[in-house]
Image (spheres, rainbow, N blue to C red):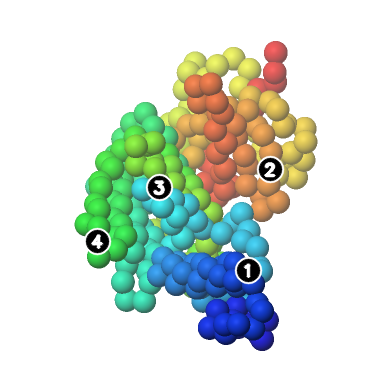
Amino acid sequence: MVATLLPVVTPFLRGRGYPVFPRVLLVLALASVVVGVALLYRDQPERFERLLSGDWASASTEAELAGTLMGQPFVPNEVYWRGDQLVFSESAGNRTRRSLVVRFDKAASLLQGTAIDLLPGDDGPWPEVVIQWYTGALTAPGLRRIPSAYTLSIALAPVGADKTDMTVHLHLPAEHATRLAGRIVLDGQPEWLGKSLNAPAPVVVEQAPAPVQPQGWQELSLQTLLERPVRFIGQPTRVLTVAGRSFEGVLKDVTGDRRIVLSLPQGANQVDFQFHPEDIALIESRARR
């Protein structure tokens, strides 16, 4: 502590033989530290609190829910379902600095089962994404609404009787400079979780007309796939969900929590989808030619 405070005191001690330039340089260094801590407290109070509490050395994991909103770091500290709306909010004290809301008011048919997956170009209703940000008193608040044409993947799993494990991947078009990815455990469970708005009849209708199915497709036992996935990895696979949506790609993996990973072509790239066994109505496989 004495070594830290001496540079502040020595500039006022003249004629003692201390060199001037090193003392001034140390004072400027200390001033930059103070300014940096002040800016950290103003812009990222949650990290400032971790610094004071001693948790600054703990590394953040990849599963932590974080991203960017309009090009600025976005780490929501409040995530919850408000009716048919999923709210991500980053607050400092009583002030909301940034928020992102996914509104399913006009796309209530997507709220069923345990997963929601949307890609640019998909047909059907789209939830509206509303982003708001507030950077300070000298800058006007911002607001944007994105009605469609973005990437959204939400997977939910009940944890006990009153919590929900949620994994999110959201990527808006490039001009919005907004993305969000990670995993979080929510308090409470949505009323629609695990339920289906459609009757089970469409599942029978999809697999009834044999001529529609390509030659070589064979129904695959879901239990067999989960127990011995190595036999089927790399084979063309088609998944029909309880919501009536069909996905065709290559079986990539079966994760440790029994989720089936399907790799689908998306232009020059590939997109991986994860399916919970409870969301799968029918799964078919075909040997590679």
Between 101 and 105, which is closer to the camera in this rendering? 101
How many angstroms separate mark 1 from mark 2 (CA)?
Answer: 61 Å
How many angstroms separate mark 3 from mark 2 (CA)?
Answer: 34 Å
Between 94 and 257, which is closer to the camera in this rendering? 94
Q: Which mark is residue 71?
A: 3
Left or right? Give the position of 65 relative to 127.
right
Q: Which mark is residue 22?
A: 1
Give amino acid for label 1: Pro
Secondary structure type for disc 2: strand
Give amino acid for label 3: Gly
Front of the two marks 4 and 1: 1
Residue that carries the numbered disc 4 in the rendered image: 138
Q: Is residue 148 visible?
A: yes
Q: Earlier in the sequence, mark 4 or mark 3?
A: 3
How many angstroms separate mark 1 from mark 3 (CA)?
Answer: 39 Å
- The local crowd at label 2, few if under 14, some if 14 to 19, many if 20 or more residues have their Cα within 10 Å, is many
How many angstroms separate mark 4 from mark 3 (CA)?
Answer: 18 Å
- The local crowd at label 4, few if under 14, some if 14 to 19, many if 20 or more residues have their Cα within 10 Å, is few
Residue 38 image offset from top left, x and y in percent: 45, 72
How many angstroms separate mark 4 from mark 1 (CA)?
Answer: 37 Å
Up/down of 289 relative to 137, above or below: above
Front of the two marks 4 and 3: 4
